[in-house]
Amino acid sequence: MSWFKRDKKAIEQATPPEERRVRTEGLWTKCESCRTIVFRKDLEENHLVCPKCQFHFRMNAKQRLALLFDSNWTEHDAGMVSTDPLKFVDTKPYAKRIKEAQKKLGMNDAIITAEGQLNGKPVICCAMEFGFIGGSMGAVVGEKVTRAIEMAMETRQPLVVVSCSGGARMMEGTISLMQLAKVSAALARLDEEKLPYISVLTDPTTGGVTASFAMLGDLNIAEPGALIGFAGPRVIEQTIRQKLPDGFQRSEFLLEHGFLDAVVHRKDLKGFLSNALDLLTC
């Protein structure tokens, strides 16, 4: 055994396992699809897509905006915060959940509304954050999307909404369900103004978000393998009393059956949106 290997082995044996684990923690990640161990930096440079099987990892809202906008972008309505209208408590108070999510993510709710340029084209974009209470839609999310629609009408800019959500926020009850109608009505006004709206569905897009603005785009596009649906498979099977096919809530199945207009790889997403906006605004 060479002196280098001998000394290296002695150092490793003298280093506590906890310390060795801390040194490598976060440097590698395992693909959820093919189980390949991927170097974290390589994954980030590949837009959080597995280089082996092309599995799309989830992006947070800020990463999504950085992917789509050319450079700097301006955030709107950042200060909006839920008032916990029902004083809801389950395993912990809803107000505490909100504060914990705000502290962890550095944002006030589950969506960011931003204005910037996409391949030189001015655009308003909303990006949802799944890490904030499952990206659920409460009064703040519904209001921010509605204000983004109104801003698009005032400035005559196209609108892009990137959905990543578990659905309506149960802690706000009927107030969260009211957002479905409010946002849908605002999108109807946007359509009357003949301004483009492109909906991008990512993994997962479910529940009340799917039942409202996520499926109301002039173009509805999704990332590969994204889970998209309203209710869960077990609920649907119990309702219709039929066995459902495998993958029936994945983006490829929905494209095949006419629920989506396109499934676009993440590396091609910005270019696809740019071309779509050219067609919709000409």
Image (cartoon, rainbow, N blue to C red):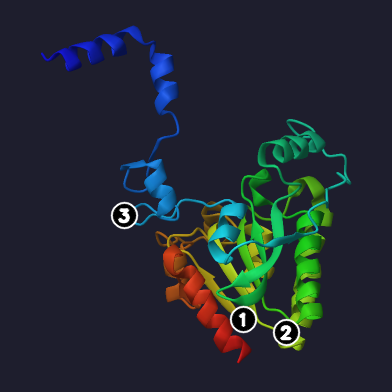
How far is mark 3 from mark 2, CA to CA? 38 Å
Q: In this view, does 174 lie to the left or right of 251?
A: right
Q: Note whether 157 is above or below 61 in the view shown.
A: below
Q: In which quadrant is the C terminus drawn?
A: bottom right
Q: Name the residue under label 2.
A: 191
Disc 2 crowd rating (10 Å Cα; few below 14, some 14-19, many 20+) is some
Image quadrant where residue 140 sits: bottom right
Say what secondary structure mark 2 lies in: helix
Q: Is residue 230 left or right of residue 248?
A: right
**Front one among 110 and 166:** 110
Specify the amino acid type for callout 3: Cys
Residue that sits furthest to the bottom in the current view? 282
Specify the amino acid type for callout 1: Asp
Image quadrant where residue 9 sits: top left
Sequence order check: which comes first, mark 2 or mark 1? 2
Q: Tell me if I can see residue 199 in this picture.
A: yes
Q: Mark 3 points at which residue?
A: 53
Disc 1 crowd rating (10 Å Cα; few below 14, some 14-19, many 20+) is some
Residue that sits furthest to the front in the current view? 3
Q: Note whether 45 is above or below 272 in the view shown.
A: above
Cβ atoms at labels 1 and 3 below 8 Å apart: no
Specify the amino acid type for callout 2: Asp
Q: Tell me if I can see residue 259 in this picture.
A: no
How far is mark 1 from mark 3, CA to CA? 31 Å
Cβ atoms at labels 2 and 1 below 8 Å apart: yes
Q: Note whether 170 is above or below 275 in the view shown.
A: above
How far is mark 2 from mark 1, CA to CA? 9 Å
Sequence order check: which comes first, mark 1 or mark 3? 3
Disc 3 crowd rating (10 Å Cα; few below 14, some 14-19, many 20+) is few
Q: Where is residue 131 in the image (x, y as percent from the top left)?
A: 62, 45
